[in-house]
Amino acid sequence: MSTGPIQPLKNAGLAAVLSALWCGLGQIYNGQIAKGIAFMIIQIINAMLMFIIIGFITYPIMWIWGMIDAYRQAEDINKQRARGYDD
């Protein structure tokens, strides 16, 4: 039996859209603050790397990875919470 307040489920689609708007926002929405900030810093570095061409490769890779990660993490959070409610 759970003694804490019931937390709402995360919307995986919203997490992905937030990461599409700004890399790392989806992770912050999921409650992974440090990971979200790390994604933002990496993306800023990737933007600066565009001056030496490699950023044109690393920026979209990180952007797509951020969206996929945010979506999957939201799904995992929801699964863990569902299992916790069943106990």
Image (cartoon, grey):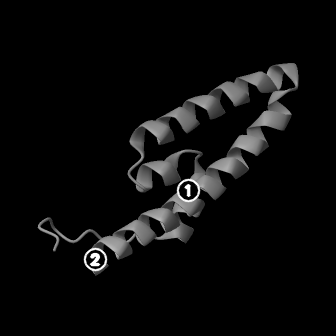
Q: Nearer the viewer, residue 3 or 14?
A: 3
CB under 8 Å between discs 1 and 2: no
Name the secondary structure under disc 2.
helix
Q: Which residue is mark 1?
A: 70
Q: Which residue is mark 2?
A: 85
- Give the left or right position of residue 60, taking residue 41 as reference: right
How many other residues sit within 10 Å of disc 1, few (<14), some (14-19) or many (≥20)? many
* Figure check: 86 above or below 27: below
Looking at this rendering, what residue extends furthest in the top direction? 52
Residue at point 11% right, 67% down? 3
Residue 8 occupies quadrant: bottom left
Whichever of labels 1 and 2 marks the residue nearer the N terminus, that label is 1
Residue at point 77% right, 44% down? 60
Residue 84 occupies quadrant: bottom left
Q: How many marks?
A: 2
Q: Nearer the viewer, residue 43 or 7?
A: 7
Front disc: 1 or 2:
2
Q: Hey, what amino acid is under mark 1?
A: Ala
User: Which quarter of the image is occupied by the C terminus?
Assistant: bottom left
Residue at point 49% right, 42% down? 36
Q: Position of residue 48 (x, y in %)?
A: 72, 23
Q: Hey, what amino acid is under mark 2?
A: Tyr
Residue at point 52% right, 58% down? 73
